[in-house]
């Protein structure tokens, strides 16, 4: 018996017994306490012993609460309730004093009850047979998902592989960061590349788990950024994994609470990044990507989130891609999208919200298309400079708020320089029969779709020659708006905040209730964010501008209320006669990295028909982008905000 | 503490110690010299000292026999004669040849099977001296279908692979996928055509391993429509519409801890935490009988190799013998000091072995209910038992990861097989008894050379004479192989009639 490990027993001390008795209001003498302590110990051990019987007969290694309760029930003791949850209960110490407790979190029943992701029943239990050992020798087939060749790697590499995959796919965010960093800089992992690629190709099996998808995409990024790795033909596999994230109607998308949009944006950025850095490794890759994006876009059966993915993908691939694929498809696509947006039925609400996403994405894409096209006419060198300055501005804007957004990673800044890359990279590709549409014609057509939502303005539409439109591109320059738009905005300075990391779309509709009553009630101009200057490139978003302001004015208040006080009505007095304007701003981090705020405004020309409509009518006609956080009919200074990653 | 059975056991029964006469004299003298009356009183009161003549045992010998809750077995406890021989196989006549030839013709490769079969299939005609009388325990008569099955069995046996250290069996692993509810018991029919699983969610599921789907008999109303004169009436009564690969049997009210197929594959027994044993029909897939008698969880149940009888054992420390047509037990075997965790029938259906959480294995005589053998030596609750096919030996596995081999006739421990690192849930001898397979919670199947282990004892006169174990230095020599599954605990093992080893376990998150 010497080799048997020493047995240990837990004991309940006399003092504990006395404490418990006191808490129940009974005074115990020493003797009684000692007797009781012994008795309690014995009974605890016996219960444990017999609960372990239940565990063993259930062929388990882990003793569950249920086992213990069964043991108690069979010995006629009341069961202990409340510990039956499947999850492990975190057992936490309190720093002060030697006290341990089991954390007991509140469960939000409302959230649970209204959750839309109703868990499906688990798969059917079945029996599968395999010949494991033939004539007592060796495995015939590899088991599990780990490629067998991994086992033939050297021990160190195999360990590395295991550690890295475990920490990236594991729970610890810190570990993940370390692993990703190492993956990005390790020079000795070339042999493991196929296995990592294999792991990444697992995106298709985790499409229900945004978190895992995200992690896998980060893994892609680290691999792509590793300067020591020659990706070779694995680029194709990586691209297909990334494209999967961009285009597929992921299982995670079913739940509207899941922010799969950000994932798609990130994947799109990654795609462009892979393409610009490694696109030369596989010939015809660009063309293939474009083709598949085009296919998705032209397929009306696909869900809107797929379309969205196609648009952001094109956008990320550069304005030429947008011009080539998105622009020609726009007329056909527009009809479908419009139908979705015009449907106000309740059942359509979710689809409509998705439609707005697509709308916003298209808007951003064509805007840049216009800008870059205009710019390209003035010379590609300027584009480059402009792009750099834009990026510089972004960084500057971010630096003003250290710690709020992640530090810029140089490699993930394809920025506006993409355009120039595109010219270089796209040169060798066959451009089929495709004639570029002249800018003015393009602008006209786009304007017919978007109207004044287009942020790019050309003062004289048709006569765009070489330089005129550049004004709108200069970051610090004031926004060129139609005179009707109520951008009387108290300058929202870019450096004021960036409290929101998420790309944010803020639409502020300002129709004041008072004017609502008046017969010819011209709704008020946009009261709130309306930042005139420097916003297009700033890292701020209007809601955060506003929020930070309001919080500076009245900390702890919701932005809506105070903002009205902060901006006295007097300031808008001259604008009161203006038609109702709708301005929104897309800003914040783009794809998690870029900080570009864009503002889109609609202004309603005071045509007779429009002004005759009650304000409510406007509201419905407004191309409201994003989810409406407040019901329109409250006529308050409504604030529409939504995470709209662009 | 009053009424606590465990304490009562300790108070009333004595701890058994076996000491050689010399050692006992020394102890007595020592205590008398020291005037240590108190210790002497304790010894008198709580110890039963079983004195034997001869050489004192070595420490390892003592260690190997200790571990039981109540000390070692008394010597006389293992003296009774056990008829461990096999029953004479019933003679099956003429149809054998016809069947055989027919089958061969179907296969399209007629061979000379007859002489072979005679050498293999038919056992020696004369009665084994160690076997019990044929009618010592009344056994059910063979039906025609049973005879057919015996013929099938013999045919298969001719194709059986002879195993040995140089010829190890192939292993097939049956994995229960998606068994999130917790797989607690598995059984496979003797002909390996059905596999059943008991689950912690109170269900029993039966799968067909062959391409033949499971068909239930049609309902009564449908049956009345059938033309009873037609030749294929037996086919017609089966319901094709509901045929499926698996059937679920609902009825229990707690985790199902043990299941057992009847030898004729018509019935399935299951026992559960709810204290009942249920008999299910595999023709209708419904519950036929619910046997109530155990008032506590029933840990294990097993059909007799000849059908009709079955045993169960559970938390109430009593093993029961039942007959399928009696709703009350025929025998109750009381004596274990803790839960009975597993029960097994001797191949001749005259004896019953039970393993218990008191770390002893007992062998009971079904005829008179006596406990004929008590085997001590395990250091943890025993979770698996297996009789060798010739009925002479018994293997037992426990939570300590050890397999012990016992000689039933002489009541001796033969061998200790070390290797497993976790509870052994499955033990099985190959069809001819050359190899012992053990499956464990540590995700491995290990094969042991049973022939070698048993040969040692035949030649070891010393052990046979004194009753002292003589363990070989290194039991690893007996180990023929270790086979790991990926992360599936092995909870059942089965040798097919051709000696293919089937292992089964549930694949789910490592609980």
Image: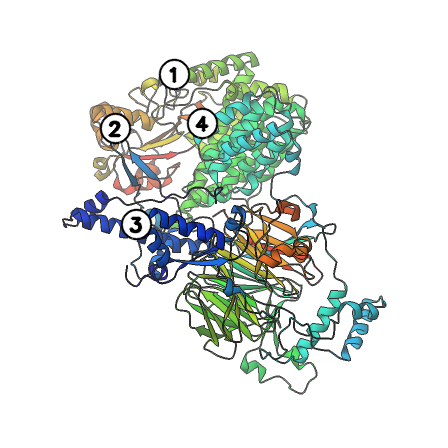
Q: Distance between the residues labelled 2 and 3?
A: 82 Å
**Tag 2 and tag 1 share a subunit:** yes
**Tag 4 and tag 1 share a subunit:** yes
User: Mark 2–mark 4 contact, CB under 8 Å?
Assistant: no
Query: Which is more N-terminal, label 1 or label 3?
Result: 3
**Tag 2 and tag 4 share a subunit:** yes
Badge 4 is on which residue? A592
Q: Distance between the residues labelled 4 and 1?
A: 15 Å
**Tag 4 and tag 3 share a subunit:** yes
Badge 2 is on which residue? A576
Mark 1 Cα-neighbour bin, 10 Å: few <14, some 14–19, many ≥20: some
Query: Which of the two marks, 2 or 3, is nearer to us in this view?
Result: 3
Q: How far apart are marks 4 and 3 (CA)?
A: 57 Å
Q: Is mark 1 on a helix, strand or loop?
A: helix
Q: Is residue B399 left or right of residue A99?
A: right
Question: Can residue B77 be seen in this snapshot?
Answer: yes
Query: Which is more N-terminal, label 3 or label 4?
Result: 3
Mark 2 Cα-neighbour bin, 10 Å: few <14, some 14–19, many ≥20: some
Query: Which numbered marker is on residue A399?
Result: 1
Q: Distance between the residues labelled 2 and 1?
A: 38 Å
Q: Chain under label 1?
A: A
Q: Chain under label 4?
A: A
Image quadrant assignment for residue A356: top left
Query: Which is more N-terminal, label 1 or label 2?
Result: 1
Which residue is at a point 27% across and 26% down the rendered structure image?
A575
Badge 3 is on which residue? A41
Residue B438's x, y, as percent?
60, 53
Q: How far apart are marks 2 and 4 (CA)?
A: 38 Å
Q: How far apart are marks 3 and 1 (CA)?
A: 63 Å
């Amino acid at each position: 018996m010497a080799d048997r490990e020493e047995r240990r027993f837990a004991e309940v001390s006399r003092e504990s017994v006395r404490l418990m008795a006191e808490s129940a209001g009974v005074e115990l003498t020493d003797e009684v306490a000692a007797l009781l302590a012994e008795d309690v110990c014995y009974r605890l051990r016996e219960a444990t012993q017999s609960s372990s019987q239940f565990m063993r007969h259930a062929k388990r290694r882990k003793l569950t609460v249920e086992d213990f309760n069964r043991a108690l029930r069979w010995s006629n003791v009341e069961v202990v309730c409340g510990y039956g949850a499947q999850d492990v209960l975190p057992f936490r110490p309190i720093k002060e004093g030697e006290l341990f407790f089991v954390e007991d979190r509140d469960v939000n029943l409302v959230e649970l009850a209204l959750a839309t992701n109703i868990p499906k029943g688990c798969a059917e239990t079945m029996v599968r047979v395999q010949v494991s050992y033939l004539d007592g020798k060796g495995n015939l087939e590899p088991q599990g998902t780990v490629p067998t060749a991994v086992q033939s790697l050297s021990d160190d590499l195999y360990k590395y592989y295991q550690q890295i995959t475990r920490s990236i796919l594991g729970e610890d965010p810190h570990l993940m960061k370390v692993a990703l960093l190492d993956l990005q800089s390790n020079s000795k992992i070339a042999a493991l590349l196929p296995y990592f690629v294999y792991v990444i190709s697992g995106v298709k099996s985790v499409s229900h788990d945004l978190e895992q998808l995200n992690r896998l995409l980060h893994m892609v990024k680290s691999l792509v950024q590793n300067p020591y790795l020659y990706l070779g033909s694995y680029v194709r596999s990586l691209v297909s994994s990334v494209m999967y994230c961009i285009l597929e109607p992921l299982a995670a998308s079913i739940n509207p609470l899941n922010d799969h949009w950000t994932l798609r944006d990130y994947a799109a950025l990654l795609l462009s990044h892979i393409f610009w850095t490694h696109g030369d490794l596989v010939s015809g890759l660009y063309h293939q990507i474009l083709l598949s994006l085009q296919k998705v876009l032209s397929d009306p059966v696909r869900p809107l989130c797929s379309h969205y993915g196609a648009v952001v993908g094109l956008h990320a691939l550069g304005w030429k891609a947008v011009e080539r694929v998105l622009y020609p498809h726009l007329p056909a696509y527009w009809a479908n999208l419009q139908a979705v947006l015009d449907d106000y039925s309740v059942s359509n609400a979710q689809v409509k919200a998705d439609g707005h996403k697509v709308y916003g994405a298209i808007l951003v894409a064509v805007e840049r298309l216009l800008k870059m096209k205009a710019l390209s006419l003035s010379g590609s060198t300027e584009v480059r400079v402009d792009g750099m300055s834009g990026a510089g501005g972004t960084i500057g804007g971010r630096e003003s708020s250290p710690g709020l957004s992640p530090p810029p990673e140089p490699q993930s800044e394809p920025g506006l320089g993409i355009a120039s890359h595109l010219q270089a990279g796209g040169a060798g590709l066959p451009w089929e029969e495709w004639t570029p549409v002249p800018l003015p014609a393009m602008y006209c057509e786009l304007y017919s779709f978007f109207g004044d939502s287009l942020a790019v303005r050309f003062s004289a539409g048709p006569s765009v020659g070489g330089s005129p439109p550049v004004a709108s591109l200069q970051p610090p320059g004031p926004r060129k708006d139609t005179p009707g738009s109520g951008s009387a905005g108290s300058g929202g300075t870019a450096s004021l905040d960036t409290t929101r990391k998420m790309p944010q779309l803020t639409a502020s509709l300002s129709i004041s209730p008072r004017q609502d009553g008046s017969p010819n009630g011209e709704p008020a101009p946009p009261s709130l964010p309306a930042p005139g200057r420097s916003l297009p490139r700033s890292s701020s978003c209007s809601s955060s501008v506003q929020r930070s302001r309001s919080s500076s004015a009245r900390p702890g208040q919701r932005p809506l209320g105070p903002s009205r006080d902060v901006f006295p009505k007097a300031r808008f007095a001259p604008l009161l006669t203006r038609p109702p304007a709708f301005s929104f701003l897309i800003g914040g981090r783009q794809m998690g990295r870029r900080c570009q705020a864009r503002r889109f405004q609609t202004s309603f020309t005071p045509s007779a028909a429009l002004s005759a409509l009650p304000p409510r009518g406007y509201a419905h006609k407004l191309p409201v982008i994003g989810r409406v956080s407040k019901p329109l009919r409250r006529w308050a200074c409504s604030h529409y905000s939504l995470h709209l990653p662009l | 503490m009053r009424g606590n059975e465990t304490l009562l056991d300790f108070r009333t029964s004595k701890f058994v110690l076996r000491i050689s006469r010399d050692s006992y004299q020394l102890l007595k003298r020592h205590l008398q010299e020291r005037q240590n009356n108190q210790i002497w009183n304790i010894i008198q009161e709580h110890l039963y000292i079983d004195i034997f003549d001869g050489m004192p045992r070595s420490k390892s010998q003592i260690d190997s026999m200790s571990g039981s809750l109540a000390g070692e077995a008394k010597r006389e406890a293992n003296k009774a004669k056990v008829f461990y021989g096999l029953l004479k196989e019933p003679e099956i006549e003429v149809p054998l040849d016809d069947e055989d030839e027919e089958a061969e013709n179907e296969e399209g490769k007629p061979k000379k099977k007859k002489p072979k079969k005679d050498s293999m299939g038919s056992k020696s005609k004369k009665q084994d001296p160690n076997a019990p009388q044929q009618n010592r325990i009344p056994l059910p008569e063979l039906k025609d279908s049973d005879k057919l099955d015996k013929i099938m069995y013999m045919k298969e046996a001719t194709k059986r692979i002879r195993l040995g250290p140089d010829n190890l069996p192939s292993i097939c692993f049956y994995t229960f996928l998606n068994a999130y509810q917790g797989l607690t018991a598995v059984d496979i029919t003797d002909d390996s055509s059905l596999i059943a699983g008991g689950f912690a969610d109170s269900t029993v599921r039966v799968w067909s391993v062959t391409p033949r789907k499971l068909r239930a008999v049609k309902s009564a109303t449908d049956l009345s429509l059938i033309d009873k004169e037609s030749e294929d009436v037996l086919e017609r009564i089966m319901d094709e519409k509901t045929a499926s690969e698996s059937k679920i049997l609902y009825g229990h009210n707690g985790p199902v801890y043990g299941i057992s197929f009847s030898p004729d594959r018509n019935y399935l027994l299951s026992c559960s935490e709810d204290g009942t044993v249920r008999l299910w029909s595999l023709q209708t897939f419904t519950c036929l009988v619910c046997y109530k008698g155990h008032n506590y969880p029933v840990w294990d149940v097993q059909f007799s190799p000849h059908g009709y009888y079955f045993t169960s054992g559970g938390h109430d420390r009593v093993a029961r013998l039942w007959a399928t047509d009696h709703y009350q037990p025929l025998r109750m075997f009381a004596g274990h000091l803790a839960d009975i965790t597993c029960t097994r029938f001797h191949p001749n259906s005259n004896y019953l072995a039970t393993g218990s959480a008191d770390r002893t294995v007992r062998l009971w005589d079904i005829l008179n209910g006596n406990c004929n053998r008590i085997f001590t030596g395990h250091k943890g609750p025993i979770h698996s038992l297996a009789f060798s096919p010739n009925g002479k030996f018994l293997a037992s596995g426990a939570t300590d990861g050890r397999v012990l081999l016992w000689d039933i006739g002489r009541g001796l421990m033969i061998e200790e097989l070390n290797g497993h690192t976790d509870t052994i849930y499955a033990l099985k001898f190959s069809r001819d008894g050359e190899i012992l397979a053990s499956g464990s919670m540590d995700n491995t199947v290990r094969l042991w050379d049973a022939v070698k282990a048993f040969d040692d004892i035949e030649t070891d006169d010393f052990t046979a004479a004194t009753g002292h174990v003589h363990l070989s230095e290194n039991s690893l020599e007996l180990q023929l192989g270790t086979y790991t599954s990926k992360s599936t605990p092995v909870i059942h093992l089965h040798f097919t009639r051709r000696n293919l080893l089937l292992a089964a376990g549930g694949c789910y998150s490592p609980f």
